[in-house]
Image (cartoon, rainbow, N blue to C red):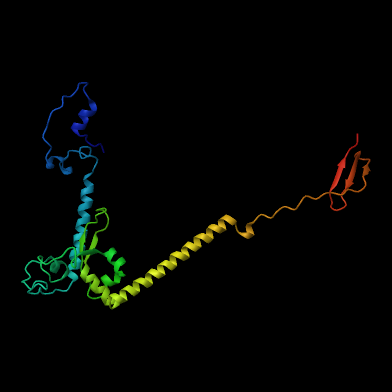
Amino acid sequence: KKKARCPASASLLRGNGTTATPRTTSPPSRSSTSRRDQESYYCAGGFDADDDADQETRDRISEAKQRKFDRSIPYQAAPDDCIECQKPLLMSFLWDSFGHPVCDACRDDQGAHRLVARTEAKRQLLLKDEDFDLRKPVLRYISRKNPHNPRYGDMKLYLRSQVEARMLQLYGSWEGFEEAKEKRTALRDIRMEKTFEKKIKKMRQEIRGNAKYKVQSRPTAHEHVFGEEKYDAEKDEYRKKCKECDYEMSYEKM
């Protein structure tokens, strides 16, 4: 299918042999530079409209998953007061998203109410997937775009205080958590050491070679001890045979 060229690009490519006089123009509006408002694929800077369609599809799927998860959470009536300031709980992002009764005025994004990604929580607090999804009550989360690449899967963000409470439920206390963390660190160090030793052993075998594949050294050269020479009248030549091996030498005399 032949695609239409951008009129501005076509005029620049054709050229008319004259020097254009520069002139000052106002910056284009956002609507005029939008990809959807361009006449063709070339005017859009090489981006196709299918990219926007794919992104919209991913957004719809992500929103549908979030709604399905929110519907699976049992309904809880909101408390009357905030647990921090004891004032009426009117506006609360934490209650709407995580069921945590703290108003927006008392919310501490950098402290107790900080959000943590699922991967980071699993690594730092020694949790597994079943601790988030299967163990009751199921930890609530919100979905956000991946900051590294929007085309990656959405990030699941959890409330740090709720994740720490789940960790204490598993290990009993912070002391028990620290002991489990030290044991896991020791086991990881042992595995890394064994892996390193295997690599060193393999490297040594490659350098030295395996014993059964070694090339056997050739025997030292044998020095013949010839006996008396004999004359062969049919071939008109002389022969001498070694006394220690079966080697026989033939020669002629001038």
Q: Quadrant of residue 38?
A: top left
Question: Which image quarter: residue 168?
Answer: bottom left
Q: Is residue 80 above or below residue 221?
A: below
Quadrant assignment for the C terminus: top right
* Residue 224 position (above or below residue 114): above
| Image side of residue 125 versus residue 18, left or right | right
Left or right of 3, for residue 214: right
**Residue sitting at the far bottom:** 172
Give above or below for 12 relative to 210.
above
| Residue displayed at 55% across by 58% down | 204
Locate residue 199, reporting x and y percent.
50, 60
Q: Which of the image's four quarters has the N terminus?
A: top left
Residue at 16% across, 43% down:
34
Q: Residue furthest top?
A: 17
Expressed as whole percent of the image width and height from the top left, the position of residue 66 reads 19, 64
Residue 155 placement: quadrant = bottom left
Q: Is residue 183 above or below residue 61?
A: below
Residue positioned 13% across, 69% down in the render: 95
Spot occupied by residue 101 in the image (x, y as percentages of width and height): 12, 71
Q: Nearer the viewer, residue 40 or 107?
A: 107
